[in-house]
Image: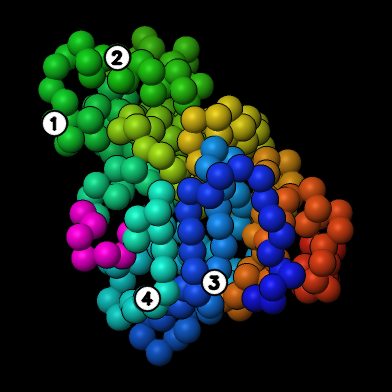
Amino acid sequence: MEENAMQSVASQTLIDIHKLNLYYGQFHALKDVTMDIPEKAITAFIGPSGCGKSTLLRTLNRMNDMIPGTRIEGKVAIGGADIYSKEVDVETLRKKVGMVFQQPNPFPKSIYDNIAYGPRLHGIRGKQKLDEIVETSLRSAALWDEVKDYLKRSALSFSGGQQQRLCIARAIAVNPDILLMDEATSALDPISTLKIEELAQELKDKYTIVMVTHNMHQAARVSNQTVFFLNGEVVEFAETEKLFSNPRDQRTEDYISGRFG
């Protein structure tokens, strides 16, 4: 990425990525990616399919570790700590860096047990405390009023939009610092999508949100800053309004104007 491809963004840096290269076997998926992602804001990753945006998202909670043949060079630090250090406990990292996937994936358990699962895993057992976490998490995910009378019902019996908000509630039940959203609305109807977007706007006051979206309009509506990827490289990283209204790179202009992608 050229020096002028990245413009300064507001707020304090939480995630520091420097000269990151990632390989799947012989395939060079991410190439010299460098960026600072600010805390308590929404950063959107956009670009055509296969450009590396989801791969980079998965480096932030080491989900790529599960893919055989993955090799990483460079630095990814959260709060100043290198998350690829041998001393890092990956389970603890994933508690701090929650993730919501493209397809809603609630456990085949009750609403209550979906939310309580993470806190129980991390040693919380008292019913009163769990009740409090379940209610707080569902309220934070704008779901409490819809499900408070059905907490023992299977999560799989609810709509896709409700299931996705449940997955957000489940992610924040363990009090993460970062919430990763990998095309979290692409399987949802427009009304559910709007609810998730409104929810993300509310949650950024408490959490740092990094979202991959195939929908440029969504990035423009929701995010504070946007990163445009192409062929595993960062082409441009700027405040969202600047990137969409006055892109500095012709490739960004061509993509957002629909000339390719």
User: What's the magenta bit mostly, secondary-structure-wise?
Assistant: loop
> Distance between the Cα atoms at labels 4 and 3?
11 Å
Residue tagged by mark 1? 123
- Could you tell me if the residues under marks 1 and 2 are in contact, i.e. CB atoms within 8 Å? no
Residue tagged by mark 4? 72
Q: Which numbered disc, 2 or 4, marks the residue that appears first in the sequence?
A: 4
Q: Which numbered disc, 4 or 1, marks the residue that appears first in the sequence?
A: 4
Examine the rendered structure and indicate whether residue 142 appears above or below residue 56.
above
- Residue closest to the eye, 188 or 253: 253
Marks 1 and 3: which is nearer the front? 3
Residue tagged by mark 3? 33
Q: Which numbered disc, 2 or 3, marks the residue that appears first in the sequence?
A: 3
One can see residue 100 in this view: no
Place residue 137 in its image quadrant: top left
Q: Of the numbered discs in the image, which one, if any, rests on residue 132?
A: 2
Q: Name the amino acid type tagged 2.
A: Glu
Residue at 29 percent across and 43 percent down: it is 95
